[in-house]
Image (spheres, helix red, strand yellow):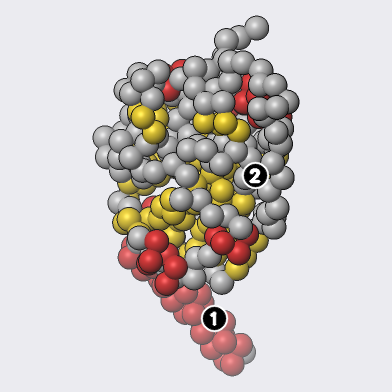
């Protein structure tokens, strides 16, 4: 049997010590739209913080996306701060958020990763991402950093630990065991950018700014201590449907959302030469039509 992560459960608690706590939460289904925000709400009792299941430092409550014609806004509600969680068992002594991945390909995560077709946002400056700065990245491949962050070997192990202690594992808009992610194997949780090309910057947003934009996680009883937000230019990513996902660096919780971006007004228009060629084609067609009309009048 594989050894468990150092920051998870090593022992069995007696019934007098461990009890299941029922948390009532209005569940946001895929594409739950409210006041312009699309929400995915995660289980409230599947974050693992040492022996604690639910409500601890690694509890993720929800993620939400809002868009205008040219800007995407992202909000995350959780108990994990951007400063991360201090843990001497981690290689750097700190466990942070992984990166936020976007998959427009329609393929599962591992296939899109193998093809280098992922997009991603590094928003936590102090995490283990291999790219140099925060921002939006294209042609992304992902790597596992749970091994160096005292984390889970795979998602099956995480799901089993949470369920064995009375928690309800989930991944937001995806089931905990959804085959979109690799479930088994050794160090198979891909949660950090390995390689990518920077294509845009992000702008940090305060909770007050997010609230003014209509964000309201509390309507789903999602009341994490941290609300983290940022925005970026939509032209940095394609339009269309996607799955976006986020893991803690130790994989002690995760969340995914199914949504889509409408075509951005900032997406590139055809080159002038293309327009000139099109106009020239229309001119030739027009001349041809005029000649045919003149010929019919003469005859």
What residue do we see at 38% from left, 25% from top? 87
Left or right relative to 169: residue 288? left
- Residue 20 horizontal side relative to residue 144, left or right: right
Q: Tell me the crowding category of disc 2: few under 14, some 14 to 19, or many 20 or more residues within 10 angstroms, Cα based.
A: many
* Element type at mark 1: helix
Q: State the residue lying farthest toward the bottom.
A: 297
Query: Can you say whether 287 is above or below 141 in the image?
Result: below
In three-dimensional space, the C-alpha distance between marks 2 and 1, rounded to whole angstroms, equals 66 Å
Q: Say what secondary structure mark 2 lies in.
A: loop
Q: Can residue 146 be seen here?
A: yes
Q: Is residue 291 left or right of residue 108?
A: left
Tags 2 and 1 in contact by the CB under 8 Å rule?
no
Residue 277 spot, x, y in % from top left: 40, 65
Above/below status of 203 relative to 47: below
**Residue 211 at what x, y percent from top left?**
44, 68
Mark sitting earlier along the chain (2/1): 2
Which residue has dot 2 on it? 43
Indicate the quadrant containing the C terminus: top left, top right, bottom left or bottom right. Answer: bottom right
Front position in the image: 95 or 188 = 95
Quadrant (top left/top right/bottom left/bottom right) for the N terminus:
top right
Task: Count the labels in the image.
Answer: 2
Residue named by callout 1: 289
Q: Position of residue 23 (x, y in %)?
A: 68, 48
The label on residue 31 is none
Give the mark toward the camera: 2 or 1. 2
Q: Between residues 193 and 226, which one lies in front from this camera angle?
A: 226
Residue drawn 60% across the image and 9% down it? 2
Mark 1, other Cα within 10 Å: few <14 / some 14–19 / many ≥20: few
């Amino acid at each position: 049997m594989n050894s468990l992560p150092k920051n998870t459960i090593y022992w069995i608690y007696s019934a007098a010590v461990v009890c299941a706590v029922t948390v009532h939460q209005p569940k946001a289904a895929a594409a739950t739209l409210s006041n312009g925000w699309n929400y995915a709400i995660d289980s409230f009792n599947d974050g693992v913080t040492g022996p604690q299941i639910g409500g601890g430092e690694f509890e993720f409550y929800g993620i939400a996306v809002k868009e205008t014609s040219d800007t995407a806004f992202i909000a995350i509600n959780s108990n994990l701060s951007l400063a991360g969680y201090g843990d001497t068992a981690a290689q750097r002594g700190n466990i942070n958020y992984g990166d936020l991945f976007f998959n427009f390909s329609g393929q599962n995560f591992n296939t899109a990763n193998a093809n280098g077709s992922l997009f991603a946002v590094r928003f936590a400056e102090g995490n283990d991402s291999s790219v140099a700065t925060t921002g939006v990245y294209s042609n992304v491949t992902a790597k596992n950093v749970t091994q160096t962050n005292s984390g889970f070997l795979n998602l099956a192990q995480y799901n089993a630990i949470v369920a064995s202690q009375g928690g309800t594992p989930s991944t937001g808009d995806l089931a905990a065991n959804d085959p979109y992610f690799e479930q088994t194997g050794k160090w198979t949780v891909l949660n950090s950018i390995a390689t990518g090309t920077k294509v845009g910057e992000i702008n940090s947003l305060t909770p007050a700014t997010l609230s003014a934009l209509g964000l309201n996680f509390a309507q789903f009883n999602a009341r994490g201590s941290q609300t983290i937000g940022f925005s970026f230019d939509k032209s940095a990513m394609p339009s269309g449907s996607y799955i976006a996902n986020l893991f803690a660096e130790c994989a002690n919780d995760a969340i995914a959302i199914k949504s889509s971006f409408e075509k951005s007004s900032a997406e590139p228009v055809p080159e002038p030469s293309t327009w000139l060629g099109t106009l020239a084609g229309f001119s030739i067609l027009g001349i041809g039509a005029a000649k045919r009309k003149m010929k019919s009048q003469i005859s």
